[in-house]
Amino acid sequence: MRVGVPREVTPGEKRVPLVADSVKRLASKKIDVSIESGAGTGSCITDEEFRAGGASVEPESSALYASADVVLRLRVPNEESIARLREGSTLIAPLFPLQEQNAPLVRALAARKVTTIAVDMIPRTTVAQMMDVLSSQATIAGYYAVLMASAALPRFFPMLMTAAGTIAPARVLVLGAGVAGLQAIGTAKRLGAVVEAFDVRAVVKEQVESLGARFVQVESGEDAQAEGGYAKETSEEYKKKQAEAIARHVKTADVVIATALIPGKRAPVLVTEEMVQSMKPGSVIVDLAAEQQGNCALTEPGQTVVRHGVSILGELDLPSRVAIHASQMYARNMEKLLLHVCNKDGALHLDPENEITRGCLITVAGDVVHPKVKERL
């Protein structure tokens, strides 16, 4: 089987789905890899390094698409990329097929008669952890969000005792204690901040406190833990109590890191304009949910804006800012996924009875096979 890795065309994207070491390991499992020339430049991987790992390097993407049995991407494909896919080939990429705006994408892939595996739909099970790109990239986003906040905040993060007096530590509020949120908590603590965290899932309280942060509790018997560890919609009564609790803590925070997402839906608005108005001048909000319209009502995806004296960072694709390690982590996820869907001879073998394969298989040869995606369409 031949795996093709084209250059990513999204502006600012520096990551690559496979690194040279991954190519070498895949070759030992009878999986050949073709890389488009320059695909690894943003991650500081040269064509020569890919060749040394055993990959063939194609000067243009047309030859790569023509020969690839499987195409790997790390961004949602555009129309041009879909048109280049060879009928009968397989695409492995983020697709977010449950989001309403991506319904035309799924239909286009089905019409192209390709098989598609959505890496964002990989079940969150113990066995599948090694393939979970959402978690690996969220780790990087949570880390980098805190670095961005510390650079934008006109205050120190740690407490400092100086000849000029004692400087109080920054107060950081993390909204959402998933992978990104927990990494943000840990990073903020390492920088010396006082950290609080909120999540609708009561089960994460212990994890938050184990990192040295205080868990913001909403007085309610409701728990929004959904299947697979994700959050789910809560009742209107809970949302009212949640808003009151968040408002109290946003008001005293120097930094808010917002990470809350609900799969297949718009990100919940947790920080209203009124809450932003209540914050101290110079405070910072980093909205990691910006790609799904944001947790803050004033977030502008892809932009940094100042509203009511508060800097609101709606940056997209933070993992690209740490492209070397982001690519290494993504590549390990792809290695495990490719080996999972291939037999011992290196040939693609998609078993619809397998829990992991069934969870992320979206289209097969022109048909939409994922039950939830089919229902949405």
Image (cartoon, grey):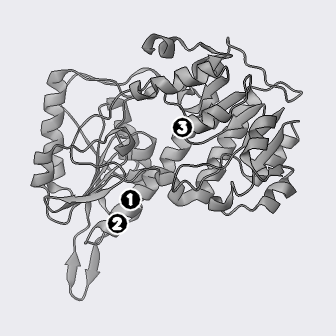
First in sequence: mark 1 vs mark 3:
3
Q: Residue at x 25, y 58 (%)?
A: 305
Q: Which mark is residue 290?
A: none
> Mark 2 touching mark 1, by CB under 8 A?
yes
- Residue 100, above or below 276: above
**Circle 3 SS class:** loop
| Left or right for 326, reference 45 | left
Residue that protrudes farthest toward the bottom in the picture: 163
Q: Residues within 10 Å of mark 3 (few under 14, many from 20)?
A: some
Q: Amino acid at mark 1?
A: Val
Please tell me which residue lies in front, 111 or 351: 111
- Residue 352, above or below 208: above
Q: Residues within 10 Å of mark 2 (few under 14, many from 20)?
A: some
Tell me where residue 292 appears, x and y as whole percent.
36, 38
Q: How many numbered circles does the render carry? A: 3
Q: Which mark is residue 76?
A: 3
Q: Residues within 10 Å of mark 1 (few under 14, many from 20)?
A: many
Residue bearing mark 2: 150
| Left or right for 198, reference 228 | left
**Circle 2 SS class:** helix
Q: Which mark is residue 146?
A: 1
Tell me where residue 361 appears, x and y as whole percent.
62, 20
Q: Residue at x 87, y 26 (%)?
A: 344
Q: Rounded to the nearest whole Å, what is the CA distance between mark 1 and mark 3?
A: 26 Å
Q: Amino acid at mark 2?
A: Ser
Tell me where residue 351 appears, x and y as whole percent.
72, 15
Mark 3 vs mark 2: in front: 3
